[in-house]
Image: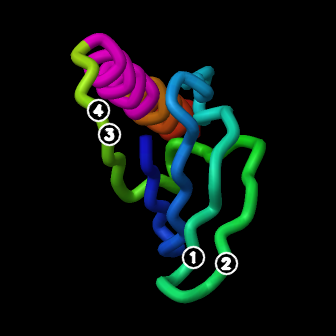
Amino acid sequence: MQVRTKNQHTYKFYEDDFIVKEDSIYGSGRNIFKPGSWDEDFTGSIPLKDIESFKFDRFDTGNTVGVIAFIAIGVGIIAFSIASGLSNL
C-alpha cells in the first residue's frame, strides 16, 4: 500500500506489513522521495488525519473495505467528539 500525506511525503508499506489501529497506520516500508534521490527505510506510524491519499498495488477487497470503514468510523468519532465538546460550552 502506498500512502501520500498532506505534506507531500510518500510512504510505500511492505505487503502485509501494516495495520490500521485506532487513528493511525502502523507498519514498515520505504519513504519514497523525489525521482533521482535515495529512498529510506521507514518503520512507524502515520496519523489518518495527515493522509491525503491511499494507493493499493494489489486490490484486496477485504483490506480496502476495512481501511475505508475504519477511516469513516474515525471521522465520525472525531465529528461526534467535536459536536459534544461544542454543546458543553
Q: Label 1, on which residue?
A: 33
Q: Residue at x 57, y 31 (%)?
A: 88
The amino acid at mark 2 is Trp
* Dot 4 crowding, Cα within 10 Å, few <14, some 14–19, many 20+: few
- Magenta-span inclusion, residue 70: yes
Disc 1 to disc 2, C-alpha distance: 7 Å
Q: Earlier in the sequence, mark 1 or mark 2?
A: 1
Q: Nearer the viewer, mark 3 or mark 2?
A: 2
Secondary structure type for disc 1: loop
**On screen, residue 54 above or below 75:** below
Q: Label 4, on which residue?
A: 58
Residue 43, horizontal then vertical, whole percent: 77, 44
Q: Label 2, on which residue?
A: 38
Disc 3 to disc 2, C-alpha distance: 22 Å
Disc 2 to disc 4, C-alpha distance: 24 Å
Q: Residue at x 38, y 25 (%)?
A: 67
Residue 7, horizontal then vertical, whole percent: 53, 73
> Which disc number belongs to residue 56?
3
> In which quadrant is the N terminus drawn?
top left
Q: Earlier in the sequence, mark 1 or mark 4?
A: 1
Disc 1 to disc 4, C-alpha distance: 22 Å
Disc 1 to disc 3, C-alpha distance: 18 Å
